[in-house]
Image: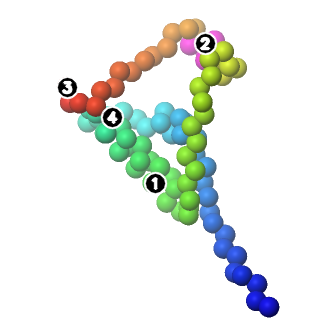
Amino acid sequence: MNQPKQTRLRVIIIDGMALVNSVSKTDQMKTCNDIAQAFIERVSTISANYDQVRLVFDQYVNSSLKDTMRQKRTKGKSTYYHIVDTLI
């Protein structure tokens, strides 16, 4: 009896928020679409040699250890960006 041929898939798992943070904003980026395009290009580059991509985003939980460490590191001062999907 012939055994079915097994195929090996190369799968990459990417921390989505780490990837978002690694996308450098340029002066040409004016809209959410511009940032999205840069993000997609980055995912495509990283995953070019893989068959499948798993893009994972953690749920942000207030009062977590991660939040406590961020508060200590930034001394409670955070930077917030207001992004609009229109040209200014």
The secondary structure making up most of the magenta span is helix
Look at 19% across and 25% down and name the residue there. Answer: 88
Q: Which residue is mark 2?
A: 71
Pointer 3 or 4: first along the chain: 4
Q: Which residue is mark 3?
A: 88
Q: Amino acid at mark 1?
A: Thr
Q: Is residue 3 above or below residue 76?
A: below
Specify the quadrant of the image occupied by residue 59. Answer: top right
Q: Is 74 left, or right, of 23 in this rendering?
A: right
Q: What's the magenta region?
A: 69-74
Nearer to me, 79 or 33: 33
| Percent x, y of residue 64 | 68, 19
- Residue found at the very far left of the displayed protein: 88
Q: CA distance from mark 1 to mark 3?
A: 30 Å
| Percent x, y of residue 41 | 40, 50
Secondary structure of residue under mark 2: helix
Disc 1 crowd rating (10 Å Cα; few below 14, some 14-19, many 20+) is few
Q: Is residue 45 located in the magenta-colored stretch of the structure?
A: no
Pointer 1 or 4: first along the chain: 4
Q: Amino acid at mark 4?
A: Cys
Look at 36% across and 33% down and name the residue there. Answer: 25
Q: Amino acid at mark 3?
A: Ile
- Asked if the residue at tag 1 contacts the one at tag 2, i.e. Cβ–Cβ closer than 8 Å, the answer is no
Secondary structure of residue under mark 1: helix
Q: CA distance from mark 2 to mark 1?
A: 33 Å
Residue 41 visible somewhere in the drawing:
yes
- Tell me the mark number nearer the camera, choosing from 3 and 2: 3
Q: Is residue 87 above or below residue 78?
A: below
Specify the quadrant of the image occupied by residue 31. Answer: top left
